[in-house]
Amino acid sequence: MLRNYIKIAWRGFKKNKAFTFINVFGLAIGLTSCLLIALYLSNELSYDKHYKNADRIYQLNTVFVKDGKESPSATAAAPMAKTMQEVFPEIEQTTRLLQTFVDDKTLFQYNDKGTLKPFYENRGFLADSTFFDVFKYQFKEGNPLKALSEPNSLVISEEIATKIFGNESALDKVIHINSNTNGESDFKVTGVFLQGKKPSHINARFFMSMRGGAMEQLINRQSSDLITHNMFFTYFRLKPNASAKTLESKFPSFVNKYLGEALKKVGLGRKFTITPLTEIHLASGLKNTVTSPGSVTYLYILASIALFTLLIACINFMNLSTARSAKRSAEVGVRKVLGAEKLALVRQFLSESILMSLFAFGFALVVTRVLVPLFAQVSGREITFSFEQHYLLIIGFFIFSLIAGVVAGSYPAWYLSSLKPVKALKGKLSNTMAAVSVRKFLVVFQFVISVVLIVSSIVIYSQMHFMRSKDLGFQREQQVIVPLRTSLAKQIYEPLKNELKKETQIRSVGACYYYPGIMNPSDMNLYRSEETVNEAKNIFMNYVDDNLLQTLDIKPLAGRLFTTEFKADTNDRLVVNHKVIAELGFKNPQEAIGKTLNWDWQGQSMPFTIVGVVNDFNFEDLHNEIKPFAFRLVTDGYNYLIVHATAENIHSVLTSIERKWQKLNPAEPFEYSFLDADFAKNFQSEERLSSIVSYFTLIAILISCLGLFGLATYSAEQRIKEIGIRKVLGASISNIVLLLSKDFLKPVLIATIIAFPIAWYAMDKWLQDFAYRINIGWWMFIVAGLLAAVIALVTVSFQAIKAAITNPVNSLKTE
Amino acid sequence: MIRLKDISKWYSNGSAKAHILRHIDIEINEGEFVSIMGPSGSGKSTLLHLMGMIDDPSEGEYFFEGESVFTLKEKQRSELYKKHIGFVFQAYHLIDELTVYENIETPLLYHKISSAERKAMVADILDRFQIVGKKDLFPEQLSGGQQQLVGIARAVITKPKLILADEPTGNLNSKQGEEIMDLFTRLNKEEGVTIIQVTHSEKNASYGSRTINLLDGKIAL
């Protein structure tokens, strides 16, 4: 019997190819979208779960308290790990990790039999000797527990090892490392680790021992300072039965005892919290984790998009199955007359729709397999898809497909099988009002989702466009960033700058420690000299040469910028932004000029004089409000040279910089980046969201259209006789097209009206994340509504026109 | 075999009743070949459907082989129907997606007959109706007469005692029509199958042993 069902189903599919295709394809797209997003979600949720003892590892967070405002950070002061381990019995082991935060890339130089080979490597860290005791990595070479115990030890990933040493063993090879963060010294390779496929919030490619570089001095100097230089990621492994809660509850008294006095002196407060390792990526609520954290909001957005896409696909599937089944009432009648019982017919229809949904499932598996690499790229995650890894997910989707098949088939199955054979044979009463209104409702529902997605796409796209084009308060285009990574590169700053200044296609050259869009780790607490340290405000600091402000085109509001004309400027002069003036309570920029700000450090007060006030500019990305910011003049140690080019042909500027660079520093390859691109990296996750949402909007529209197309086809077929009669009576083609299209436009319009408030609410919420954001405009809704209407109209009218131009003689002959 | 007692059927159209059948009394014995005649709308088909148990009257009683059909439970009625009745339609009503062989086999599937037996029975019928060569064709590849032949083969394969035919030759030319009527006569004479047909044609009616004339839902004498 089952074979018979399948045979009939198969022939039915072949006979109604378009219909079957729309149905299978639509569901397959829905399943594929959902499968892809499920892969993404499972990847996001599996961060750090693979580490041994993951449930006992915690990250220590420092909460800075100032004027009652709390700002938490994922990092802590250098000696905190050791101090806490001594104080708290719960802690079994600690380890610290320090980002090479001033390095965009770190230069490795390897002396291969006399030739010095340079390699730029990123994602480097300084780590304690205990790091691989807390975080178990698989090593290809070397002993994890001893690898970082000696100063100047280096553990690299297998990928770096292969790149530098080929097939040779990397162990005991010496690499000369130039780091802006850790200075310049030789490191010996003591281990090579395998980069697993499982995601971790620590995405390191190499680890330097904490000792042996420039950082060691700082750490030693800070050995009793529990307050400043909070930049070390600090992890604890608790003893097997220790309670994290108990530990956390002891922190307030710890703060009192060990930090209380020092804090009082500077007028600050402190708190500590711990985050379980497995929650760092998604649930810590901290922004400055080792790798930028995932967003729970985005997970919700994606999960709901996935569900809705699937829902649309299922609705289509059901809708089309029902529509098609009406055409089969005659068959049902015959079968009943031949002795078929109700249950036999139910089984037949169910097996047909299940067969169809299983086709869709198979199709979806194949398409997912093909699309995973592309999706991984779009989503910026290392996502793979294999049966061994995801068999649970696959089984889940298989079951889901079965259910979708049963649900989609059940309405037509029960409805048709309960028809009276006489009525069924006449095949007329099949299109009941209930069935029609259910289908209309489903069409409305689909288009609500599509329109919400269209509006969201428009809003997200507009915000992205806004962020790319907003006036940031400085010139971000035509700026070439040349990193000065090594001591030699820093030394050639002066001659290189002088050479470049001669070029006509270069407008200006400046140098600095940091530039807008990248991390600006320096700050100071400054107060007006007539006030006390309690009134101090936190001000971000950048260290620049005498031409940087002009290069970035930052405009002065009062006083002056640092220039070559004022040779007397020293590093106790400040150029501040307008925000500093406002926060410190100056009436206007003019008033601040010549005033002194004090900085208390190790019991001493140091004075700084304001020589200039500049307009506010976005040195951080647009999620954040502009904060107080100041520039100090220094004469060396710059990390970046910034070249403002005038030429339209940026390429020739780059070649000319490269030529000069190679003349002065031949051993080091020339590298560069663009300021606007670097700034844009800050909204990479939004860019990704934007592209994912637009992809899925397209998919949702596509599926909805498939459904609408199917229904229009069905409707035109149902009304073929009516159309024939109308034409005989003199209706024109446009009359007929209008007649058929009208039926479908109405649900789309209703959907649009329902969708607007939903879309507005969701997008307004999303925009709250940005300190600088667009306003949601009416035009966005109008565009979305028109777009939906046009798409629906085109889809429907295709069938309507086809039906309208049919010769009525043919359509009337069918009875 | 069949006894209809005071059968009426109407549709309510607002407050008015539209009568299709009024107070019909009919008795048909086993082995008869009865023709039902009458103009369009006289209720012929409805009467046939009632006798075939695929439609219900508004009032009246129906005894089939002494059993009161309308008081039987759905399941029992369906069993009774399956066992004894075969239908032949004017529009043939073959299933388009199935071959000739499969169309004929379908009722056997619903009668839960084993695969080996089915094969033998279908082969036998194909042979008797001389359509072996057509068994793998689809309905659309056959002429109307051939389609109706398949329709009858499908109706008789379950060896029903009663065949109900609703204008079986209505869509056929006269030569094809004659062949079909000859086939009915043979089934009636040689195998003792009771046949009731609805027809417009005096000529076709003459193949039967008795004619019932319907006019406006009443038996015309």
Image (spheres, helix red, strand yellow):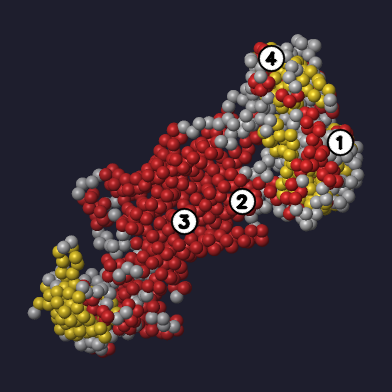
Toward the top, the furthest residue is A565
The residue identified by callout 1 is A224
- Tell me the subunit letter for badge 2: A
Residue A763: horizontal and vertical position, in percent?
Answer: 51, 39
Identify the residue under disc 2.
Answer: A41
| Residue B70 appearing in the image | yes
Residue position for label 4: A592
Mark 2 residue type: Leu
Residue at the (89%, 38%) spot, across then down:
A212
| Label 3 residue SS | helix
Whole-percent x and y of residue B84? 30, 83
Residue A722 or A136: which is nearer the viewer? A136
Question: Disc 1 to disc 3, how far (Cα)?
Answer: 64 Å
Q: In this rendered view, identify the residue nearer to me: A682 or A286.
A: A286
How many angstroms separate mark 4 from mark 3 (CA)? 66 Å
- Which class describes the residues within 10 Å of circle 4: few (<14), some (14-19), or many (20+)? many
Q: Earlier in the sequence, mark 4 or mark 2?
A: 2
In this picture, is A426 found above or below A490? below
> What residue appears at the point 25 percent right and 71 percent down from the top-left corner?
B90
Tell me if label 1 and label 3 are in contact, CB under 8 Å: no
Provide residue B70's location: percent of width, then percent of height.
Answer: 26, 79
> Which x, y percent locates residue A411?
40, 63
Q: Which residue is mark 3?
A: A314
Closer to the chain start, of discs 3 and 2, is: 2
Pointer 1 indicates a residue of which chain?
A: A
Distance (Cα) linking label 2 and label 1: 43 Å
Residue neighbourhood size for the residue with mark 1, other residues' Cα within 10 Å, grouped as few (<14), some (14–19), many (≥20)? few
